[in-house]
Image (spheres, rainbow, N blue to C red):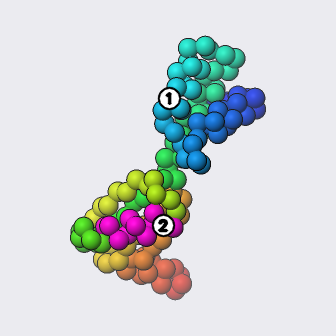
Amino acid sequence: MKISKVAAANARRLFGLCQTDGRLDEDKLRTACAEIAAKKPRDHRAMLAALHRLARLDLERRTVTVESAEPLSAADQRRISANLAARYHDRLVFNFSVDPALLGGLRVRVGSDVFDGTVQGRIDRLASVFK
C-alpha cells in the first residue's frame, strides 16, 4: 500500500505524541490507534500502517540479541545487560541464545548495530582477506 505524504506526516506526528520522555508509551499508542479506527479519518488505513511500521522499528531498536557459543551464566547476563543499558537506554528487551557454530566469543545485535567478537567472525574476516 502506498502511503500519502499527509498520512505519513500525520502518523509521525501521532507517534511523537505517543512518546513520554523520549520513549514510546504503548498505552497512548493503543488509544491513538483505537481512536483512528473508530473515527476513520481520510487515509486511516495508511495512517495505521505507518504507525505500525514506526512502532515495529522502535521495538527493533530496543531489542538486543546476544549469541554465544556456550550458555552464559546469570552474572554474565546481568553484566552484559547493565553495560548495554548504560550505553543505549534502560528499556531494552534482551534475548540470550546459544549457537555452537560461533566457536567462542559473543555476537551482540542491538537494533541495527552488530558487535561481533566471535571466533567464527574472526575466521570469516581473515578468510575474506585471502580471497
Q: Position of residue 41 (x, y in %)?
A: 67, 16
Seen in the image, is 100 located left or right of residue 111? left
| Quadrant hosting residue 8 | top right
Of labels 2 and 1, earlier in sequence is 1
Q: Is residue 20 above or below residue 73?
A: above
Could you say which disc has been placed on residue 30 in the image?
1
* Magenta-drawn stretch, dominant element (helix, strand or loop): helix
Q: SS for tag 1?
A: helix
Q: Is residue 83 magenta?
A: yes
Q: Residues within 10 Å of mark 1 (few under 14, many from 20)?
A: few
Q: Is residue 88 above or below residue 40?
A: below
Looking at this rendering, what residue extends furthest in the top direction? 39
Looking at this rendering, what residue extends furthest in the front direction? 21
Which region of the structure is painted magenta? 77-87
Q: Is residue 68 above or below residue 111?
A: below
Residue shown at 45%/53% (left/top)?
91
Seen in the image, is 85 located left or right of residue 16? left
In the rendered image, which residue does mark 2 sit on?
86
Q: Label 2, label 1: how many angstroms apart (C-alpha)?
A: 28 Å
Q: SS for tag 2?
A: helix
Q: Are marks 2 and 1 in contact (CB under 8 Å)?
A: no
